Amino acid sequence: MATTVHEPSRLDPSRAPDHGNGGGGNLVPADSDRRLALDYSPPPSSTAIWVVLFAITMMFAAFTSALVVRKGGSGDWRSFKLPSILFFNTLVLFASSITLEVSRRRIALFMGKVQEQVESPTRWLYVTLCLGVLFVAGQYVAWSQLRGEGLYLATNPSSSFFYVLTVTHALHVLGGLGGLIYAIRKLGKSSLRRSTLEAAARYWHFMDLLWLYLLLLLWVKL
Amino acid sequence: MHDTSAQAVQHHAPTSFIRKHVFSLDHKVIGKQYYALALAAALIGMVLSWIMRIHLGWTNAAIPGLHALSPNGAPGGVLTPEYYLQLMTMHGTIMVFFVLTTAPFAAFGNYFLPIQVGAEDMPFPRFNMMSFWVTFIAFLVLVASFFLGDGPTLGGWTQYAPLNAIGSSSGPGQGLGVVLWMTSIALFCIGQLLGSLNFISTTLDLRVKGMSLMRLPLSAWAWFITSCMGLTAFSVLMPACILVILDHLAGTSFFVASGLVLNDQVIPHSGGSTLLWQHLFWFFGHPEVYIAIVPGIGIVSHILLANMRKPMLSQRVLIYCMGALAVLSYMVYGHHMFVSGMNPVSALAFSFPTLVITIPATITVLIWVFSLYGSRLRINSASLFALGFISMFVSGGVSGFFLAQPSIDIMLHATYFVVGHFHMVMGVAAMFGIFAGTYFWFPKMSGRMMNETLGKVHFWLSFAGTYCIFMPFHYLGLVGNIRRYSTFVDDFLQPLIPVHRLITVAALITGAAQLVFVYNLIHSRFWGKPAPDNPWEATSLEWSTATPPPWDNFGGKHPVVYHDPYQYGVQSSVGDYVMQASPEQVKTDHEEK
Amino acid sequence: MGKFFAITILVIAILSAIPIVMHTWEAPADISTHGHLIDEQMSETMAEAGISFLAAQLLLAFFVWQFSNRGTETKLKSFPGGAKALVIAALLVVGVEVLALGVFGVKAWADVYLIPPSANAMPIQVQAGQFAFYFRYPGPDGKFGPLHPERINEGSQEFFGLDKEHDVDSRDDIVTAEMAVPVNKEVHLLMHAKDVGHSFFVRELRVQQDFVPGLDVSLHFTATKIGRYEIVCTQLCGLGHYNMKAYLDVLSQDDFNEWMKKETAMQ
């Protein structure tokens, strides 16, 4: 199955000088004495994903400061033990980042036709997807365990923040799953751009890092 | 055209009515949709202000139509104290979010940023379309609070805790009204974040050949800087709103402290932090007001340049000033909290950057004013509003000197001095930026010229009128007129009522003048004189293309940029200017250093 | 029309300045010990702001007058010195101005907020709730009894939730709807909110401070002139916000003692 990954060409000299949209297009006309110009624009999805990750970071920064203020402000904070399944979930999410990287390498090999017979390049993407779903399911188990212990959203500020942080993170992971499904579909139709896959991967790894941060925050503060 | 570049255009020319005018992926249509939303919001917000002003002047005035809208809130058309506060809250919320963030940034930015960088559209048109419709739904949710439950929330656009979280026993609108407000604003934040995504990607990644960052027009820079601010600010307000909703609906206590008593009942929430809301809100809130003004700074600069027929003394310095305003805006937010009970030492820490922020603002004004020196200034509706912006920006900014100092804030906090300050910079200057942009860009957007005479009438009435309304606010504040009072019953406030009546008269007249503008817009849209491609002899890329631009902006041809954006005062084959996309080399001593 | 614009700005600038120059809009007479610092700061700022305002508007008016609607053959000029001169001028003039204001304003702020009350300041507690202020004096034992929010009952005038039966310290506490203080005696005002945010503002005393639900906040001041002054709420607290006020009576020591006797009898 032939696939092509569209890539904005870098400094492609064969392109006509007046086709300048986006990548490769910021060259300054030779008849000008201006030196300052970017020779290559990153694909918009690359910029976009950093924008998205920044916004998500700011949101969790707001939640973090709310947690710190709330904990320090009044004496009603009751710590509790984090459900142990969280550590298993962490490993699952970490594994999914690894499988995502494996799938990217395989897809790149397949694209570059380095190995003619690479097995279905989508397989490892599906594995990542499954691990992601497993993570969310595991989080659900954690929430059920807490409810079983009588710790609900409003029980105590500590449990409030636990739910707010983990549920918000899980919702964003679901968004990441959506991105992976989008990549899988595009790959199936032979129209997946490398920049799209890269963006989806960056987002996914960020979810992993974010989870490690949240786990640390909850472990230290709760 | 084979697109080998990044996903610059993901849609083809629309064919159906729905695709052309309703669920459009075209940034130009989305820009116009935002403009229409802002216009509707502005008219609603203005009518609310009329009702407020009439009530402040004449407490027992029966206002026609109000009884029908809310028999409880305005029995017989006379406002109850709570309904005054509810209308005041909606006035502020609608104006700040749905007018001042929407028109200068989302409306004009969506329409013109892609064109000014030379692109065919923004890189994520579906997200762009989503951003408008999410904003529109946010507006509907907000307006719905007029008609549901016991009305809108009455806590002001600042929605301080614990009033915002403690529930309906604290007043009408404090149950469902607050939940609707928080939901609306959270949705608004999402809409703006989707917008910022597109704006940033467009500016960084879709610039056409020859368009280096320093060759971007000042309006493009302003939209780019504003979208960076929005990215940082809206992503903090949204979680704060979510936490308030949880306090209402899920029994959490993020913001409600222990031991509070309403109607002799102890409130079940406990342990929450009152000040937490203020920190989160103002971390967003102060950058928000710069989000409201920075696009205006860019637009006014852009328009003045076209009308001065000479370059600015330094374009680069203006860009740095806009950037400095953006960065500093995050460090000053505590000046809203000087007497809030936060650590008094931090008050001094916030005061210092607040005073320092006057420096880039001053430099901006000086560059404008001294660029006028030696120019060939053309006077038309657009340039009049641009000049009016400068005057208003100075007036509004100067009152900031007072409020930036905590010791003076002791006397001016929560008085009409503050209300005068922010109305002058936001309610007038930012609005003038919108008007200037409208008069300037209407020909390009619609293919027709606006009526100049009506434009000038609109300007003179608005300029004189807004000074008559808002300058007296400062005097009222100096004698201690407290804000957010529905009626003036205190001994020292009663003698001020005649002043309020005069202000109300000015407000009603100025309001009527805005109807001249609306008439001009509508009439010109259908019957205005057909506009040429470049009626102002301006240089940036939007004037290189047809009027109005085709669906892909440049008719399949990509422009190449050869010049800085403001090459006025040169001698070229077309006149005293050379367009950015023109390959003609001209003699000029005004090249950007 | 450019000239007309210039004239309009001139008129607006002058009309705006007149009320300030004529001192017709100023805070009422100062009855505090620290207020003169605030008033001086205010005058200083008014002068600097006023000059900046007038200078900027007049320059704008002048340049629009001179350079609007000139023919296309007229020569374009560039301001000598260019942007560099303006940036340096702004940095120096505005920079020094704002730094001076900031530095000199610290004392006025510190006197109110950073210096603790003296040991023999008279403690008075004030509670802000929708929509009234209530005050509590500790009585002869000098101690405030504990507060019990669940005992608050406005109908039976139990505003603070005191338990005079079980709490010995509460028995001689005096609850009033007006605040009286002896002249020239430092007062330590202990502030708490019953329900939502409120604020305490007395213009003549040059103090303003929010009540923060969940926090005990305090102020201290010394009133220097006998008289009756209004305390108004300045933080939006609900529908009765406009009407939420109390009176501060600054009395001679003898009159204050009389007042205290009267109030004690009414408990």
Image (cartoon, rainbow, N blue to C red):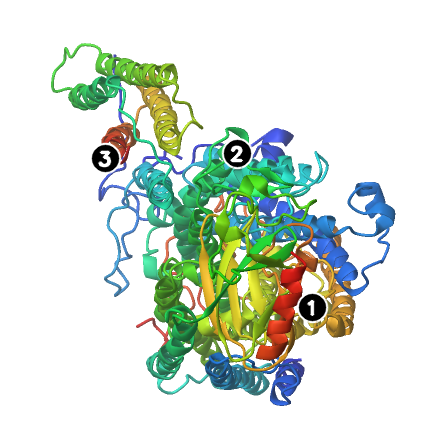
Looking at numbered disc 3 in the image, what kind of residue is underneath it?
Val
x, y (%) of residue B305?
49, 70
Tell me the quadrant of the picture where the N terminus of chain B can be found: top left
**Residue B524 seen from this side:** no
| Chain at numbered mark 2 | B
| Chain at numbered mark 3 | A
The residue furthest left is A114
Query: Element at badge 3?
Result: helix
Tell me the quadrant of the picture where the C terminus of chain B can be found: bottom left
- Numbered label attached to residue B579: none
Q: Is residue A165 left or right of residue C199?
A: left
- C58 versus B459 height, above or below: below
- C248 versus B104 height, above or below: below
- Residue at the spot 66% in from the left edge and 43% down from the top edge: B171
- A192 versus B193 height, above or below: above
Q: Is residue C119 left or right of residue B517?
A: left
Residue nearest the observer in this picture, A221 or C244: C244
Looking at numbered disc 2 in the image, what kind of residue is underneath it?
Pro
Q: Are marks 2 and 1 on the same chain?
A: yes
x, y (%) of residue B163?
57, 45
| Residue assigned mark 3 | A220
Disc number lying in front (2 or 1): 2
| Residue assigned mark 1 | B462
